[in-house]
Amino acid sequence: MQRSGSRSTIVVACAVLAALLAVPAAGSAAPTPPRVTFVGDSVPASISYVTAAQAELNRGMRMRFDLKVCRRLVQPSCPHQGRRPTTALQAVRSYGSALGKALILDVGYNEGAPGYAAGLDQVVRTALAQGAQGVVWVTLREAGKNASIYRATNAIIRTARARWKGRLYIADWALYSRGKPWFGRDGLHLTPAGARELAAWLRPYALLAANGQAYAP
């Protein structure tokens, strides 16, 4: 399984390299880096505190980070410090046409699998209607006391790719991060090193989605 994840990463990286080699002709203006919005919950939120991770995702893109503790997909988010953050769907809708060329979505640790498929479709449909070329959906770590729930959610995420062929990019973090030492005691939340690894690993997916390029995971 780990070898399969490595092949997937190599294929994505090669596709991005091909795109980056398409350098503008001499004298032509350099293209404006695409806007990409990253909507997530407390797991990817570590990126907000790690400057090197943010810098990695900002290479060749203009990243907007909207990462909130207790966020859920479409159901009301759980309370944190007396407030409920917006849901992923509400966050995406709030940006309208300013959402950007791609959306990265990493949400699901605060909810169960029932209703997740419908919520995923709502978010993808909304992002595409607001001008995104593609959506990068990150699978969940299958660790901790709710590992079985996350496994069920991941099955839903992977199945969704067939419904949104060419527009939904599955970034299989569950597979890629298996056995890696990048997490806190709960096996989910990222250390600073983990935040850098997630950012570097997601960057090729975001570039492909922002440019509407096909990939073969």
Image (cartoon, rainbow, N blue to C red):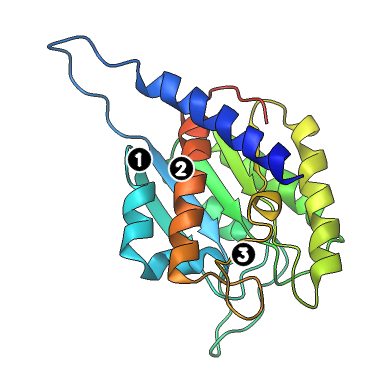
Rendered residue at 69%/52% (across/down): 139
Picture coordinates of residue 194, whole percent (x, y):
50, 63
Q: Mark 3 points at which residue?
A: 87
Q: Quadrant of residue 82?
A: bottom right
Picture coordinates of residue 64, whole percent (x, y):
39, 53
| Secondary structure of the residue carrying numbered label 1 | loop
Query: Which quarter of the rendered picture does the N terminus lie within?
Result: top right
Q: Nearer the viewer, residue 163 or 60?
A: 60
| Secondary structure of the residue carrying numbered label 2 | helix
Q: Which of marks 2 and 3 is nearer the N terminus?
A: 3
On residue 61, the disc is: 1
| Secondary structure of the residue carrying numbered label 3 | loop
Picture coordinates of residue 152, whole percent (x, y):
86, 58
Comparing marks 2 and 1, which lies closer to the viewer? Answer: 2
Q: Name the residue under label 2.
A: 203
Contact (CB < 8 A) between labels 3 and 1?
A: no
Q: Which of 35 and 95 is in front in this view?
A: 35
Judged from this view, the residue extending furthest toward the left is 27
